[in-house]
Image (cartoon, rainbow, N blue to C red):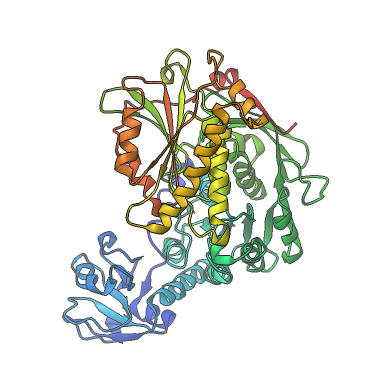
Amino acid sequence: MMSSDINKDAGRGMMPMTVCEVVQAVHGRLVTCDAQTFDAPYAQSPLLTSVESDSRLIVPGGVFVAIPGQRVDGHDFVRVAASKGALAALVEHEVEDAGDIVQIVVPDSVKALGLLARHNIDRRRAADDDFSIIGITGSVGKTTTKDLLKSLLSKLGPTVAPIGSFNNDIGLPLTALKVNASTRFFVAEMGANHVGEIAGLTRIAPPDVAVVLKVGVAHLGEFGSVDRIAQAKSEIVQGLMPNGVAVLNADDERVAAMRNLAPGKVLWFGLNGYAADVKTLTMSAEQISVNSFDQPYFTLVDSEGARARTHLELSGDHNVINALAAATVARFFGMGLETIARGLGQVTQISAHRMAISRRVRPDGSQFVLIDDSFNANPDSMRAGLMGLASWRGGTEDTEGGVVDRIAVLGCMLELGDEELTLHRQIGRNAVELGLDGIIVVGSALDSHVQSLAQALYDEAARVADRRDHGVGETEARRAVIHRKTENATGRRPTVVRLVQDIDQAAALVNAWQPGRSGMAVLLKGSHASGVSRLADRWPEALKATFASDSTRGLSESVDKGLGA
Protein backbone atom coordinates (compact mmCIF):
# COMPACT_ATOMS: atom_id res chain seq x y z
CA MET A 1 0.00 0.00 0.00
CA MET A 2 1.36 3.42 -0.89
CA SER A 3 2.21 5.83 1.95
CA SER A 4 -0.41 8.27 0.68
CA ASP A 5 -3.03 5.54 1.11
CA ILE A 6 -1.99 4.28 4.51
CA ASN A 7 -1.95 7.84 5.85
CA LYS A 8 -5.32 8.93 4.52
CA ASP A 9 -7.03 8.46 7.91
CA ALA A 10 -4.13 9.60 10.09
CA GLY A 11 -4.91 12.60 12.24
CA ARG A 12 -8.61 12.76 11.37
CA GLY A 13 -9.85 12.35 14.92
CA MET A 14 -9.44 10.65 18.26
CA MET A 15 -10.64 7.27 19.47
CA PRO A 16 -14.46 7.78 19.60
CA MET A 17 -15.75 8.37 23.15
CA THR A 18 -19.13 8.82 24.81
CA VAL A 19 -19.95 11.86 26.91
CA CYS A 20 -19.81 9.72 30.05
CA GLU A 21 -16.39 8.43 29.11
CA VAL A 22 -15.08 11.97 28.70
CA VAL A 23 -16.60 13.05 32.03
CA GLN A 24 -14.90 10.17 33.80
CA ALA A 25 -11.56 10.72 32.06
CA VAL A 26 -11.35 14.38 33.09
CA HIS A 27 -13.02 13.96 36.51
CA GLY A 28 -15.58 16.55 35.49
CA ARG A 29 -19.10 17.54 36.48
CA LEU A 30 -21.82 17.28 33.86
CA VAL A 31 -24.20 20.14 33.10
CA THR A 32 -27.26 19.62 30.88
CA CYS A 33 -27.66 21.56 27.67
CA ASP A 34 -30.59 23.77 26.67
CA ALA A 35 -32.20 21.36 24.23
CA GLN A 36 -31.78 18.05 26.02
CA THR A 37 -32.29 16.54 29.42
CA PHE A 38 -29.30 14.41 30.24
CA ASP A 39 -30.17 10.76 30.75
CA ALA A 40 -28.44 7.40 30.42
CA PRO A 41 -29.19 6.72 26.72
CA TYR A 42 -27.87 10.17 25.75
CA ALA A 43 -24.80 9.63 27.87
CA GLN A 44 -23.98 6.37 26.20
CA SER A 45 -24.94 6.91 22.57
CA PRO A 46 -23.44 10.11 21.07
CA LEU A 47 -19.84 9.53 20.06
CA LEU A 48 -17.40 12.42 20.37
CA THR A 49 -14.77 12.19 17.65
CA SER A 50 -12.48 15.23 17.86
CA VAL A 51 -11.21 17.93 20.24
CA GLU A 52 -10.30 21.54 19.50
CA SER A 53 -9.53 24.66 21.54
CA ASP A 54 -10.20 26.96 18.58
CA SER A 55 -13.91 27.33 17.84
CA ARG A 56 -13.09 28.03 14.18
CA LEU A 57 -11.81 24.46 13.81
CA ILE A 58 -14.80 22.70 15.35
CA VAL A 59 -16.51 20.02 13.28
CA PRO A 60 -19.78 18.21 14.09
CA GLY A 61 -19.35 15.66 16.86
CA GLY A 62 -16.43 17.49 18.43
CA VAL A 63 -15.46 18.62 21.92
CA PHE A 64 -14.59 22.28 22.48
CA VAL A 65 -12.05 23.10 25.20
CA ALA A 66 -12.66 26.57 26.65
CA ILE A 67 -9.25 27.87 27.73
CA PRO A 68 -9.05 31.27 29.45
CA GLY A 69 -6.17 33.33 28.05
CA GLN A 70 -4.63 36.72 28.66
CA ARG A 71 -6.38 38.29 25.68
CA VAL A 72 -9.16 35.88 24.75
CA ASP A 73 -11.33 33.68 26.96
CA GLY A 74 -12.48 30.49 25.29
CA HIS A 75 -15.65 30.52 27.40
CA ASP A 76 -16.87 33.39 25.21
CA PHE A 77 -16.94 31.02 22.23
CA VAL A 78 -18.82 28.03 23.64
CA ARG A 79 -22.02 29.06 21.88
CA VAL A 80 -20.11 29.47 18.60
CA ALA A 81 -18.73 25.95 19.01
CA ALA A 82 -22.24 24.63 19.66
CA SER A 83 -23.51 26.29 16.49
CA LYS A 84 -20.83 24.45 14.51
CA GLY A 85 -21.89 21.06 15.82
CA ALA A 86 -19.80 20.57 18.96
CA LEU A 87 -21.59 18.14 21.28
CA ALA A 88 -19.64 18.93 24.44
CA ALA A 89 -17.44 21.61 25.97
CA LEU A 90 -14.82 21.41 28.71
CA VAL A 91 -15.34 24.55 30.79
CA GLU A 92 -14.02 25.93 34.07
CA HIS A 93 -17.39 27.44 34.93
CA GLU A 94 -20.89 27.02 33.66
CA VAL A 95 -21.62 29.18 30.62
CA GLU A 96 -25.10 30.66 30.38
CA ASP A 97 -27.01 30.65 27.11
CA ALA A 98 -24.44 28.28 25.59
CA GLY A 99 -26.84 26.64 23.17
CA ASP A 100 -27.33 22.97 22.42
CA ILE A 101 -24.15 21.64 24.00
CA VAL A 102 -23.22 19.53 27.01
CA GLN A 103 -20.93 21.34 29.42
CA ILE A 104 -18.37 19.39 31.45
CA VAL A 105 -17.11 21.57 34.30
CA VAL A 106 -13.51 21.03 35.44
CA PRO A 107 -11.19 22.98 37.77
CA ASP A 108 -8.59 23.57 35.05
CA SER A 109 -9.42 23.13 31.38
CA VAL A 110 -5.77 22.76 30.31
CA LYS A 111 -5.18 19.96 32.82
CA ALA A 112 -8.46 18.35 31.76
CA LEU A 113 -7.26 18.49 28.16
CA GLY A 114 -4.13 16.61 29.22
CA LEU A 115 -6.17 13.98 31.07
CA LEU A 116 -8.39 13.43 28.05
CA ALA A 117 -5.34 13.11 25.79
CA ARG A 118 -3.77 10.54 28.11
CA HIS A 119 -7.04 8.57 28.10
CA ASN A 120 -7.01 8.62 24.30
CA ILE A 121 -3.41 7.35 24.24
CA ASP A 122 -4.26 4.60 26.75
CA ARG A 123 -7.21 3.56 24.58
CA ARG A 124 -4.92 3.32 21.55
CA ARG A 125 -2.27 1.36 23.44
CA ALA A 126 -4.92 -1.12 24.57
CA ALA A 127 -5.67 -2.00 20.95
CA ASP A 128 -4.05 -5.04 19.39
CA ASP A 129 -2.23 -3.26 16.59
CA ASP A 130 1.28 -1.82 16.89
CA PHE A 131 1.51 1.75 18.13
CA SER A 132 4.57 3.76 19.10
CA ILE A 133 5.16 7.26 20.45
CA ILE A 134 8.36 9.05 19.53
CA GLY A 135 9.14 12.09 21.68
CA ILE A 136 11.57 14.74 20.43
CA THR A 137 13.21 17.51 22.44
CA GLY A 138 16.26 19.76 22.24
CA SER A 139 17.16 23.43 22.33
CA VAL A 140 17.19 23.62 18.52
CA GLY A 141 15.99 21.44 15.67
CA LYS A 142 12.88 19.88 17.24
CA THR A 143 10.41 20.94 14.59
CA THR A 144 12.65 20.19 11.61
CA THR A 145 13.47 16.75 13.01
CA LYS A 146 9.78 16.15 13.65
CA ASP A 147 8.94 17.07 10.06
CA LEU A 148 11.67 14.81 8.65
CA LEU A 149 10.71 11.91 10.90
CA LYS A 150 7.01 12.22 10.13
CA SER A 151 7.79 12.02 6.43
CA LEU A 152 9.93 8.90 6.90
CA LEU A 153 7.61 7.04 9.28
CA SER A 154 4.60 7.77 7.08
CA LYS A 155 6.08 5.26 4.65
CA LEU A 156 5.68 2.58 7.35
CA GLY A 157 2.20 3.45 8.58
CA PRO A 158 -0.29 6.23 9.44
CA THR A 159 1.61 8.88 11.39
CA VAL A 160 0.30 11.72 13.54
CA ALA A 161 2.54 14.72 14.24
CA PRO A 162 1.86 18.33 15.21
CA ILE A 163 1.57 21.11 12.69
CA GLY A 164 4.24 23.70 13.43
CA SER A 165 5.50 23.75 17.02
CA PHE A 166 2.56 22.38 18.99
CA ASN A 167 4.91 21.29 21.76
CA ASN A 168 3.49 22.56 25.06
CA ASP A 169 0.77 21.55 27.51
CA ILE A 170 -1.92 22.63 25.05
CA GLY A 171 -0.41 21.76 21.68
CA LEU A 172 0.83 18.29 22.59
CA PRO A 173 -2.48 16.98 24.02
CA LEU A 174 -4.43 18.47 21.12
CA THR A 175 -2.18 16.52 18.76
CA ALA A 176 -2.42 13.37 20.92
CA LEU A 177 -6.19 13.62 20.51
CA LYS A 178 -5.76 13.07 16.76
CA VAL A 179 -4.46 9.56 17.45
CA ASN A 180 -7.04 6.91 16.56
CA ALA A 181 -7.30 3.19 15.89
CA SER A 182 -5.50 3.51 12.53
CA THR A 183 -2.49 5.41 13.91
CA ARG A 184 0.83 3.54 13.83
CA PHE A 185 3.14 6.35 14.99
CA PHE A 186 2.68 9.50 17.05
CA VAL A 187 5.62 11.90 16.73
CA ALA A 188 5.42 14.22 19.74
CA GLU A 189 7.49 17.40 19.91
CA MET A 190 8.18 18.35 23.54
CA GLY A 191 9.33 21.84 24.53
CA ALA A 192 9.78 23.57 27.85
CA ASN A 193 10.44 26.91 29.52
CA HIS A 194 10.83 25.45 33.01
CA VAL A 195 12.09 22.31 34.71
CA GLY A 196 9.22 19.85 35.08
CA GLU A 197 7.31 20.77 31.92
CA ILE A 198 8.64 17.95 29.77
CA ALA A 199 8.01 15.50 32.61
CA GLY A 200 4.39 16.63 32.51
CA LEU A 201 4.22 16.09 28.76
CA THR A 202 5.61 12.56 29.08
CA ARG A 203 2.83 11.78 31.55
CA ILE A 204 0.34 12.69 28.83
CA ALA A 205 2.15 10.80 26.06
CA PRO A 206 4.84 8.47 27.50
CA PRO A 207 7.29 7.89 24.65
CA ASP A 208 8.53 4.52 23.47
CA VAL A 209 11.45 6.32 21.84
CA ALA A 210 12.94 9.57 23.17
CA VAL A 211 15.13 11.75 20.92
CA VAL A 212 17.36 14.45 22.44
CA LEU A 213 19.02 16.73 19.89
CA LYS A 214 21.04 19.39 21.68
CA VAL A 215 21.33 21.34 24.91
CA GLY A 216 21.81 25.02 24.09
CA VAL A 217 20.99 28.40 25.58
CA ALA A 218 17.41 28.77 24.32
CA HIS A 219 15.20 29.99 27.21
CA LEU A 220 18.31 30.53 29.34
CA GLY A 221 16.55 33.36 31.16
CA GLU A 222 13.73 31.08 32.25
CA PHE A 223 15.97 28.20 33.34
CA GLY A 224 18.83 30.17 34.87
CA SER A 225 21.68 27.96 33.63
CA VAL A 226 22.58 25.56 30.85
CA ASP A 227 22.77 22.75 33.41
CA ARG A 228 19.13 23.40 34.30
CA ILE A 229 18.26 23.27 30.61
CA ALA A 230 19.98 19.89 30.40
CA GLN A 231 18.03 18.73 33.44
CA ALA A 232 14.77 19.74 31.77
CA LYS A 233 15.63 18.01 28.48
CA SER A 234 16.61 14.83 30.34
CA GLU A 235 13.04 14.48 31.61
CA ILE A 236 12.05 13.00 28.25
CA VAL A 237 14.49 10.12 28.81
CA GLN A 238 13.27 9.61 32.37
CA GLY A 239 9.69 9.60 31.07
CA LEU A 240 10.25 6.71 28.66
CA MET A 241 8.03 3.66 28.79
CA PRO A 242 9.62 0.62 30.51
CA ASN A 243 12.40 -0.65 28.22
CA GLY A 244 12.00 2.46 26.08
CA VAL A 245 14.77 3.51 23.69
CA ALA A 246 16.83 6.70 24.07
CA VAL A 247 18.17 8.23 20.84
CA LEU A 248 20.94 10.63 21.83
CA ASN A 249 23.28 13.09 20.12
CA ALA A 250 26.77 11.68 20.61
CA ASP A 251 28.35 15.06 19.77
CA ASP A 252 26.79 16.91 22.73
CA GLU A 253 28.31 16.06 26.10
CA ARG A 254 25.24 17.08 28.10
CA VAL A 255 23.00 14.94 25.90
CA ALA A 256 25.45 12.04 26.00
CA ALA A 257 25.34 12.08 29.81
CA MET A 258 21.63 11.23 29.65
CA ARG A 259 22.51 7.63 28.78
CA ASN A 260 22.68 6.97 32.53
CA LEU A 261 18.96 7.79 32.82
CA ALA A 262 17.78 5.51 30.02
CA PRO A 263 15.68 2.52 31.14
CA GLY A 264 16.66 0.47 28.11
CA LYS A 265 18.63 0.60 24.87
CA VAL A 266 20.56 3.72 23.81
CA LEU A 267 21.06 4.57 20.12
CA TRP A 268 23.61 7.20 19.07
CA PHE A 269 23.69 9.65 16.18
CA GLY A 270 26.30 12.28 15.39
CA LEU A 271 29.17 13.34 13.17
CA ASN A 272 32.01 11.99 15.31
CA GLY A 273 30.66 10.83 18.66
CA TYR A 274 33.43 12.43 20.71
CA ALA A 275 31.10 13.44 23.55
CA ALA A 276 29.67 9.95 24.02
CA ASP A 277 33.04 8.20 23.69
CA VAL A 278 31.48 5.38 21.69
CA LYS A 279 33.29 3.44 19.00
CA THR A 280 30.30 2.91 16.73
CA LEU A 281 27.46 5.33 16.04
CA THR A 282 24.04 3.99 15.12
CA MET A 283 23.88 6.65 12.41
CA SER A 284 26.50 9.12 11.22
CA ALA A 285 27.34 11.17 8.15
CA GLU A 286 30.41 11.68 6.02
CA GLN A 287 31.38 13.54 2.84
CA ILE A 288 29.21 16.51 3.75
CA SER A 289 28.99 19.31 1.22
CA VAL A 290 26.50 21.99 0.24
CA ASN A 291 25.35 23.13 -3.16
CA SER A 292 25.00 26.74 -4.24
CA PHE A 293 21.64 26.91 -2.48
CA ASP A 294 23.28 25.85 0.82
CA GLN A 295 21.42 22.53 0.71
CA PRO A 296 23.48 19.72 2.24
CA TYR A 297 24.57 16.53 0.48
CA PHE A 298 26.04 13.74 2.58
CA THR A 299 26.48 10.01 2.99
CA LEU A 300 24.54 8.16 5.68
CA VAL A 301 26.59 5.53 7.51
CA ASP A 302 24.94 3.01 9.83
CA SER A 303 26.47 0.95 12.63
CA GLU A 304 27.27 -1.92 10.26
CA GLY A 305 29.15 0.32 7.85
CA ALA A 306 26.45 0.41 5.17
CA ARG A 307 26.39 3.67 3.22
CA ALA A 308 23.80 5.60 1.23
CA ARG A 309 24.15 9.00 -0.45
CA THR A 310 21.38 11.52 0.26
CA HIS A 311 20.58 15.22 0.34
CA LEU A 312 18.13 17.63 1.94
CA GLU A 313 15.94 20.18 0.23
CA LEU A 314 16.40 22.31 3.37
CA SER A 315 18.94 25.10 3.59
CA GLY A 316 21.82 24.78 6.04
CA ASP A 317 24.28 22.01 6.87
CA HIS A 318 23.16 22.24 10.51
CA ASN A 319 20.16 20.21 9.38
CA VAL A 320 22.39 17.17 8.81
CA ILE A 321 22.32 16.38 12.54
CA ASN A 322 18.51 16.64 12.51
CA ALA A 323 18.38 14.26 9.56
CA LEU A 324 20.63 11.80 11.40
CA ALA A 325 18.28 11.82 14.39
CA ALA A 326 15.29 11.10 12.15
CA ALA A 327 17.22 8.43 10.26
CA THR A 328 18.21 6.70 13.50
CA VAL A 329 14.58 6.36 14.57
CA ALA A 330 13.45 5.18 11.13
CA ARG A 331 16.24 2.59 11.10
CA PHE A 332 15.16 1.37 14.55
CA PHE A 333 11.66 0.74 13.19
CA GLY A 334 13.04 -1.37 10.35
CA MET A 335 13.39 1.04 7.44
CA GLY A 336 16.22 0.23 5.04
CA LEU A 337 19.10 2.66 4.70
CA GLU A 338 18.52 3.29 0.98
CA THR A 339 14.83 3.93 1.67
CA ILE A 340 15.77 6.41 4.39
CA ALA A 341 18.19 8.17 2.04
CA ARG A 342 15.56 8.49 -0.68
CA GLY A 343 12.96 9.63 1.84
CA LEU A 344 15.13 12.40 3.28
CA GLY A 345 15.74 13.78 -0.20
CA GLN A 346 12.01 13.91 -0.88
CA VAL A 347 11.05 16.09 2.10
CA THR A 348 10.05 19.47 0.73
CA GLN A 349 7.18 20.34 3.08
CA ILE A 350 8.33 21.64 6.45
CA SER A 351 6.59 23.73 9.08
CA ALA A 352 6.08 27.41 8.28
CA HIS A 353 8.87 29.95 8.80
CA ARG A 354 11.62 27.31 9.09
CA MET A 355 14.30 27.72 6.44
CA ALA A 356 11.53 28.02 3.86
CA ILE A 357 13.10 29.15 0.59
CA SER A 358 11.08 30.98 -2.05
CA ARG A 359 11.56 33.55 -4.78
CA ARG A 360 9.77 36.85 -4.13
CA VAL A 361 9.04 39.98 -6.16
CA ARG A 362 9.82 43.53 -5.01
CA PRO A 363 7.53 46.45 -5.96
CA ASP A 364 9.89 47.41 -8.80
CA GLY A 365 9.52 43.95 -10.33
CA SER A 366 12.97 42.66 -9.41
CA GLN A 367 13.13 39.24 -7.78
CA PHE A 368 15.06 37.98 -4.78
CA VAL A 369 15.42 34.78 -2.78
CA LEU A 370 13.73 34.83 0.63
CA ILE A 371 15.06 32.47 3.31
CA ASP A 372 12.37 32.52 5.97
CA ASP A 373 13.58 31.07 9.27
CA SER A 374 11.64 33.50 11.41
CA PHE A 375 9.44 31.32 13.59
CA ASN A 376 11.78 31.69 16.54
CA ALA A 377 15.42 32.30 17.38
CA ASN A 378 18.12 31.55 19.90
CA PRO A 379 21.89 32.05 19.61
CA ASP A 380 22.53 28.59 18.15
CA SER A 381 19.83 28.78 15.48
CA MET A 382 20.70 32.41 14.74
CA ARG A 383 24.33 31.50 14.01
CA ALA A 384 23.24 28.55 11.87
CA GLY A 385 20.94 30.77 9.83
CA LEU A 386 23.63 33.41 9.33
CA MET A 387 26.17 30.81 8.23
CA GLY A 388 23.66 29.41 5.77
CA LEU A 389 23.07 32.88 4.32
CA ALA A 390 26.82 33.52 4.07
CA SER A 391 27.22 30.29 2.07
CA TRP A 392 24.35 31.04 -0.30
CA ARG A 393 25.41 31.41 -3.94
CA GLY A 394 22.15 30.59 -5.73
CA GLY A 395 21.59 29.58 -9.32
CA THR A 396 22.04 31.66 -12.44
CA GLU A 397 18.55 33.13 -12.02
CA ASP A 398 19.39 34.26 -8.47
CA THR A 399 22.46 36.34 -9.27
CA GLU A 400 23.28 39.37 -11.32
CA GLY A 401 26.66 39.40 -12.95
CA GLY A 402 27.55 36.29 -10.97
CA VAL A 403 27.18 38.13 -7.67
CA VAL A 404 24.50 37.77 -5.02
CA ASP A 405 24.02 40.23 -2.16
CA ARG A 406 23.26 38.63 1.21
CA ILE A 407 21.07 40.59 3.59
CA ALA A 408 20.04 39.48 7.08
CA VAL A 409 16.91 40.95 8.66
CA LEU A 410 17.31 40.16 12.34
CA GLY A 411 14.91 40.46 15.25
CA CYS A 412 15.79 40.03 18.89
CA MET A 413 16.15 36.77 20.84
CA LEU A 414 14.09 36.50 24.03
CA GLU A 415 14.32 34.57 27.31
CA LEU A 416 18.12 34.61 27.51
CA GLY A 417 18.43 35.96 31.07
CA ASP A 418 21.36 37.99 32.33
CA GLU A 419 23.47 37.13 29.27
CA GLU A 420 20.97 38.53 26.75
CA LEU A 421 22.88 41.69 25.86
CA THR A 422 26.18 39.83 25.53
CA LEU A 423 24.58 37.16 23.34
CA HIS A 424 23.03 39.80 21.07
CA ARG A 425 26.40 41.54 20.72
CA GLN A 426 27.98 38.22 19.75
CA ILE A 427 25.40 37.72 17.01
CA GLY A 428 26.03 41.24 15.71
CA ARG A 429 29.75 40.53 15.56
CA ASN A 430 29.22 37.12 13.92
CA ALA A 431 26.99 38.59 11.21
CA VAL A 432 29.63 41.10 10.14
CA GLU A 433 32.53 38.64 10.39
CA LEU A 434 30.68 36.28 8.04
CA GLY A 435 30.94 38.91 5.33
CA LEU A 436 27.24 39.66 4.82
CA ASP A 437 26.42 42.62 2.61
CA GLY A 438 23.60 44.01 4.71
CA ILE A 439 22.32 43.66 8.27
CA ILE A 440 18.93 45.13 9.14
CA VAL A 441 18.17 44.97 12.86
CA VAL A 442 14.50 45.28 13.81
CA GLY A 443 13.78 46.94 17.15
CA SER A 444 10.57 48.37 18.56
CA ALA A 445 9.42 51.88 19.37
CA LEU A 446 6.75 50.39 21.66
CA ASP A 447 8.77 47.83 23.63
CA SER A 448 11.84 49.13 25.46
CA HIS A 449 13.14 45.62 26.17
CA VAL A 450 13.01 44.56 22.54
CA GLN A 451 14.60 47.87 21.57
CA SER A 452 17.49 47.44 24.04
CA LEU A 453 18.28 43.98 22.66
CA ALA A 454 18.14 45.20 19.07
CA GLN A 455 20.34 48.17 19.99
CA ALA A 456 22.98 45.85 21.48
CA LEU A 457 23.06 43.72 18.33
CA TYR A 458 23.20 46.79 16.10
CA ASP A 459 25.88 48.62 18.09
CA GLU A 460 28.28 45.67 17.99
CA ALA A 461 27.60 44.96 14.31
CA ALA A 462 28.18 48.61 13.42
CA ARG A 463 31.37 48.74 15.52
CA VAL A 464 32.85 45.62 13.92
CA ALA A 465 31.80 46.74 10.44
CA ASP A 466 33.55 50.07 10.96
CA ARG A 467 36.74 48.35 12.14
CA ARG A 468 36.58 45.90 9.24
CA ASP A 469 36.20 48.71 6.71
CA HIS A 470 39.46 50.10 8.06
CA GLY A 471 41.18 46.71 7.83
CA VAL A 472 41.17 46.05 11.57
CA GLY A 473 40.42 42.69 13.15
CA GLU A 474 39.52 40.64 10.06
CA THR A 475 39.00 37.02 11.09
CA GLU A 476 39.82 33.71 9.46
CA ALA A 477 36.10 32.90 9.45
CA ARG A 478 35.34 36.00 7.43
CA ARG A 479 38.22 35.44 5.02
CA ALA A 480 36.96 31.89 4.39
CA VAL A 481 33.49 33.17 3.55
CA ILE A 482 34.86 35.94 1.33
CA HIS A 483 36.89 33.30 -0.54
CA ARG A 484 33.87 31.17 -1.36
CA LYS A 485 31.37 33.97 -2.08
CA THR A 486 31.52 33.68 -5.87
CA GLU A 487 34.21 33.30 -8.47
CA ASN A 488 33.28 36.68 -9.94
CA ALA A 489 33.35 38.61 -6.68
CA THR A 490 36.02 41.27 -6.66
CA GLY A 491 37.27 43.38 -3.82
CA ARG A 492 35.75 43.71 -0.39
CA ARG A 493 32.52 45.60 0.01
CA PRO A 494 31.58 47.15 3.34
CA THR A 495 28.74 45.64 5.34
CA VAL A 496 25.78 48.00 5.56
CA VAL A 497 24.27 47.94 9.07
CA ARG A 498 20.94 49.59 9.85
CA LEU A 499 18.63 49.74 12.88
CA VAL A 500 14.87 50.17 12.28
CA GLN A 501 11.89 50.45 14.60
CA ASP A 502 9.41 48.14 12.88
CA ILE A 503 8.92 45.71 10.03
CA ASP A 504 7.56 48.44 7.74
CA GLN A 505 10.92 50.20 7.86
CA ALA A 506 12.72 46.88 7.37
CA ALA A 507 10.63 46.11 4.28
CA ALA A 508 11.34 49.58 2.91
CA LEU A 509 15.10 49.03 3.23
CA VAL A 510 14.87 45.68 1.43
CA ASN A 511 12.85 47.32 -1.34
CA ALA A 512 15.37 50.15 -1.62
CA TRP A 513 18.43 47.89 -1.79
CA GLN A 514 19.92 48.47 -5.26
CA PRO A 515 16.56 49.00 -7.02
CA GLY A 516 15.97 46.83 -10.06
CA ARG A 517 18.73 44.39 -9.14
CA SER A 518 17.71 40.74 -8.84
CA GLY A 519 20.86 39.24 -7.32
CA MET A 520 19.85 39.21 -3.66
CA ALA A 521 19.16 36.69 -0.87
CA VAL A 522 17.35 37.85 2.28
CA LEU A 523 17.27 35.93 5.56
CA LEU A 524 14.48 36.55 8.09
CA LYS A 525 15.42 35.48 11.62
CA GLY A 526 14.18 36.46 15.08
CA SER A 527 12.05 35.43 18.02
CA HIS A 528 8.34 35.22 17.32
CA ALA A 529 7.68 38.33 19.43
CA SER A 530 10.02 40.39 17.25
CA GLY A 531 7.44 40.32 14.45
CA VAL A 532 10.01 39.51 11.78
CA SER A 533 7.90 36.55 10.62
CA ARG A 534 5.24 38.97 9.37
CA LEU A 535 7.69 40.24 6.78
CA ALA A 536 7.37 36.97 4.86
CA ASP A 537 3.99 38.09 3.55
CA ARG A 538 5.19 41.50 2.35
CA TRP A 539 6.36 40.30 -1.04
CA PRO A 540 4.36 38.11 -3.44
CA GLU A 541 5.89 34.86 -4.60
CA ALA A 542 7.30 34.65 -8.08
CA LEU A 543 6.39 31.69 -10.25
CA LYS A 544 7.12 28.52 -8.33
CA ALA A 545 10.72 27.44 -8.70
CA THR A 546 12.47 24.28 -7.58
CA PHE A 547 15.77 24.95 -5.87
CA ALA A 548 18.39 22.34 -6.76
CA SER A 549 15.90 19.49 -6.92
CA ASP A 550 18.12 17.84 -9.53
CA SER A 551 20.66 15.95 -7.46
CA THR A 552 23.14 15.85 -10.32
CA ARG A 553 23.16 19.61 -10.62
CA GLY A 554 23.33 19.96 -6.86
CA LEU A 555 26.33 17.69 -6.54
CA SER A 556 28.17 19.40 -9.36
CA GLU A 557 27.65 22.75 -7.67
CA SER A 558 28.54 21.50 -4.20
CA VAL A 559 31.06 23.32 -2.08
CA ASP A 560 32.98 21.21 0.41
CA LYS A 561 32.59 22.62 3.90
CA GLY A 562 34.93 20.17 5.58
CA LEU A 563 32.37 18.69 7.96
CA GLY A 564 32.96 14.99 8.42
CA ALA A 565 35.34 12.65 6.71
Considering the image in quadrants, where does the C terminus appear?
A: top right
**From this viewpoint, is residue 312 visible?**
no
Rendered residue at 53%/33% (across/down): 465
- Percent position of residue 219, x then y: 54, 60
Using the rendered view, name the quadrant where residue 400 is placed. Answer: top left
- Percent position of residue 480, x then y: 64, 26
In the image shown, does 42 or 443 lie closer to the viewer? 443
In the image, taking residue 138 as reference, residue 547 lies left or right, namely left
Is residue 565 shown above or below 453? above
Is residue 335 shown above or below 473? below
In the image shown, does 41 or 33 lie closer to the viewer? 33
In the image shown, does 222 or 306 lie closer to the viewer? 222
**From this viewpoint, is residue 178 visible?**
yes
Using the rendered view, name the quadrant where residue 490 is placed. Answer: top right
Rendered residue at 47%/18% (across/down): 403
Rendered residue at 46%/68% (across/down): 169
- Percent position of residue 306, x then y: 74, 35
Q: Residue furthest front?
A: 470
